[in-house]
Amino acid sequence: MKTGTLAASLAAAGLLSLAACGGGGGSGSPSVTAAPAPTQTTPTVPTTTLPPEQAAITFANASVHDPSVVRVDGTFYIFGSHLAAAKSTDLMNWTKIADGANAANPLFADVTKQLAETFAWAQSDTLWAPDVIRLDDGKYYFYYNACKGDSPRSALGVAVADKIEGPYVDKGIFLKSGMWGEAGADGTLYDPVKHPNVVDPQVFRDKDNKLWMIYGSYSGGIFILAMDPATGKPLPGQGYGKHLLGGNHARIEGAYVQYSVDTGYYYLFTSFGGLDANGAYNVRVARSRHADGPYVDAKGTDMATVKADPAKPLFDDASIAPHGQKLMGNHQFALAAGETGAAPGYVSPGHNSTYYDPATKQYFIIFHTRFPGTSPVHEVRTHEMFVNEDGWPVIAPFRYVPLARAAGAPSATVAAADVAGSYKLVNHGKDISAAIKPSQSVTLSADGKLGGALAGTWTHKGNNRIALAVDGTAAVYNGVLSRQYNANANAFTVTFTAQNADGVSLWGARAGN
């Protein structure tokens, strides 16, 4: 074979290079250079980036029935029935600081003596749900109350302290109820179906700094009084005040008002039903542009008209169940694949207070609850709240843990692409029932369709807003997306909480995919 032919063949095979000589001295014939030996390389193995491991989240729980919250110098205090109290700096870990209406309780210098008149009137040896507020003089005002229990014979008064943890000094009773055959605070014969049981106070300021007290339980319902900030007692001439909700012994109590700077509404939270494990406590809300009402639900019903039917048996729930926006009741989430521990849920959650943090612009709800399978045991829980696009509060499905505790610093923004997947869904319904509502499996498909236990469509509306149009339900559920801590999975997961104009709430928690 000729050299030229060989070179061409080798070149075609990629085994040599052709180098032409330029300038002088070359023969003009191509030179043949052997190709370098191939370099041996180690194949690159793709690396898998594992998600950051979530550090364990721990809680310290406390039993404080009917917790009323106040924040002092960065510490949250809750005061509850039976003169129980606890404190926390993070709403997750609570330290008990007092318990029991006895001489040893540090909140009073021997409460049995200081409040002897209260105990005597109520024919009781304990105290019911109190409230504490700091007034303009810098002192702390402790609104105490006692009730006989099987009747609305109660007394309500105030004690004052220089420090939040006391000791409180009694300033006297200012309201009584349950005086059979005698005149009540309004000068008329006390009537338990229209006059209040003077328990469960909350004292609050409106947006103009005017002081109010809302109170009442069962009996004649929930009432509100204008208060004197100089004395911490009601302004004269009001009797029992203005009626806002309930009556005819309707099972409604635990009133608490929260003003929202975002919406300009006052929200009136109450608990419908009974507080024990079989009592079906559930939290509801109504709203008003004015602190003293009228308060309405999403249907526009004036809650002052919501009361039991006197023609029906005592504690008629059927007449009141259709009204108010039901935020939560008895429920239990099933465990998803890979989750461990007891299936989470609540029994008779209620008698809440709320807190708005102006620095972080977050709303919180603090309440007591019992748990499935542990009937008498109750503990305090805190959940974050949001306001949906209809201007109604909605409650996050899991107890509060700040997103800053999440591994990998996930965004607080939940994009549409993060939403599609499988969920555990609780429909809280509208009933007042001791039955525990189990979660159902639903799918939010990427194409915007609902599957599983629900049929219909879902829409991501931006700014963590979500809407669910459920077949068979005319009213759309408008809700809020967030990442919440799932203790059974030790992970932060996508959740939604939504509510419709019928006053029904849905909670959804991502089930791992």
Image (tube, rainbow, N blue to C red):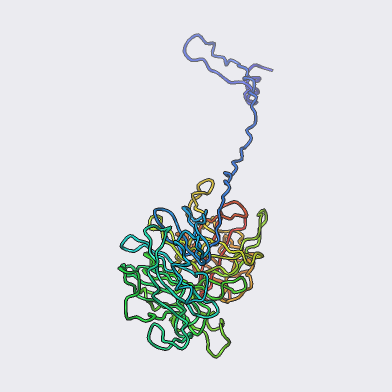
Q: From this viewpoint, which residue is outermost toward the right?
A: 1
Whole-percent x and y of residue 182?
Answer: 43, 87
Foreground residue among 9 and 246: 246
The answer to which of 105 and 33 lies nearer the viewer is 105
Q: Is residue 21 above or below residue 14?
A: above
Q: Quadrant of residue 279?
A: bottom right
Q: Residue at x 48, y 53 (%)?
A: 90
| Residue at position x 64%, y 35% in the image | 45
Residue 236 x, y percent position in the rendering: 32, 78
Q: What is the x, y in percent for residue 323? A: 50, 79
Residue at image point 46% right, 52% down: 89
Residue at the extreme top: 25
Query: Split into 4 quadrants, where in the image is the C terminus?
Result: bottom right
Question: Residue 3's x, y, as percent?
Answer: 64, 16
The answer to whether residue 160 is visible is: yes
Residue 513 in view, yes or no: no
Q: Nearer the viewer, residue 176 or 369?
A: 176
Q: Nearer the viewer, residue 480 or 353?
A: 353
Picture layout, residue 346 above or below residue 487:
below
Q: Residue furthest front?
A: 113
Quadrant including the N terminus = top right
Counting labels gives 0
Left or right? Give the position of 117 relative to 31: left
